[in-house]
Image: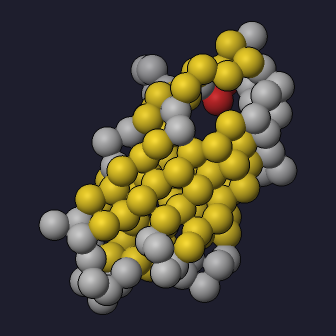
Amino acid sequence: QVQLVESGGGLVQAGGSHRLSCAASGSIFGFNAMGWYRQAPGKQRELVAATTRGGSTNYADSVEGRFTISRDNAKNTVSLQMISLKPEDTAVYYCNAEERYFHRNYWGQGTQVTVSS
């Protein structure tokens, strides 16, 4: 059973930095794309950043230049380094991963990031 476990949520002041981590377990095949999504109150879940197994990345326009996604294929982990945080970054952040070969999609339980002004 594949599980994604996020860690690192919390309360941060505007302008500050924070790091989220996600560990995926339960797959012997590993993962293709891994990424981070977020959902703010009253809004739809949106893609924040994603990375392919080969290391290509893409970012939402709103976080480009402020957030950096990275992954470790051997450990099946993905991280999100966030700097220059803004109150509008406040959301529940979800880790997402697509299992190799079977292309099944998995979600973490979410972790709250609150940016205070």
Q: How many numbered marks, from 0 up?
A: 0
Q: Say which quadrant the C terminus sits in.
A: top right
Q: Point out residue 66 in the picture as x, y percentages from the top left corner.
A: 80, 45
Q: Point out residue 88 in the picture as x, y percentages from the top left corner.
A: 66, 24
Q: Is residue 2 above or below residue 90?
A: below
Q: Is residue 64 above or below residue 2?
A: above
Q: Is residue 71 above or below residue 4?
A: below
Relative to 91, is 98 on the left or the right?
A: left
Q: Point out residue 47 in the picture as x, y percentages from the top left corner.
A: 54, 50
Identify the residue at image location x=31%, y=67%.
25
Q: Say which quadrant the N terminus sits in.
A: bottom left
Relative to 89, is 1 on the left or the right?
A: left
Identify the residue at image location x=56%, y=73%.
72
Identify the residue at image location x=27%, y=77%.
27
The residue sitting at the left extreme is 1
Residue 45 visible: no
The residue sitting at the top extreme is 117
Relative to 73, is 68 on the left or the right?
A: right
